[in-house]
Image (cartoon, rainbow, N blue to C red):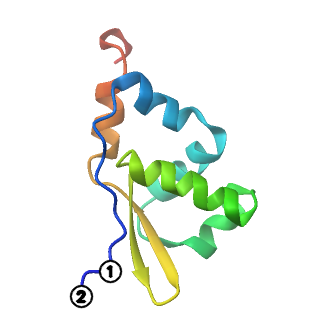
Amino acid sequence: MDTSTAVAAVGLEAPELLAVVADPVRWRLLAHLADGGTRCVCDLQPVAAVAANLLSYHLKVLREAGLVRASRRGRWIDYTIAADAADRLHAALPAGAS
């Protein structure tokens, strides 16, 4: 049974994608997930340093942007950075930024 809660990216334009990661909480979450591996939402709570409902909101924004993937494990949700997240963010930067 597929228990993934991944949401298909809605085809964000570059400025919209960059706006998603411009938020300090979402940036911290991405940086933590970029270290590799899958993290339980309970491990992300201290990294986000926000209330649980705000953490859920920020993770939802990252999922909808296609930057993270989520999978359910019992009552817990595990998050991992999307395989193409770095490429998509790099492509969103202005051409002279590389």
Mark 2 neighbour density, 10 Å: few (under 14) some (14–19) many (20 or more): few
Is residue 58 shown above or below 4? above
The label shown at residue 42 is none
Residue 43 position, x and y percent, is: 61, 72
Q: Which residue is mark 2?
A: 1
At horizontal 51% and vertical 37% (from top left) the residue drawn is: 21
Residue 57 position, x and y percent, is: 59, 55
Q: Quadrant of the N terminus?
A: bottom left
Residue 31 position, x and y percent, is: 53, 49
Q: Are marks 1 and 2 in contact (CB under 8 Å)?
A: yes
Is residue 16 shown above or below 39? above
Q: Please, what secondary structure does the residue beneath circle 2 have?
A: loop
Which of the 4 quarters of the picture holds residue 63?
A: bottom left
Question: Who is closer to the viewer here, 64 or 21?
Answer: 64
Please name the amino acid that badge 1 sits on: Thr
Q: Please, what secondary structure does the residue beneath circle 1 have?
A: loop
Q: Which residue is mark 1?
A: 3
Which of the 4 quarters of the picture holds residue 32?
A: bottom right
Q: Is residue 10 left or right of residue 59?
A: left
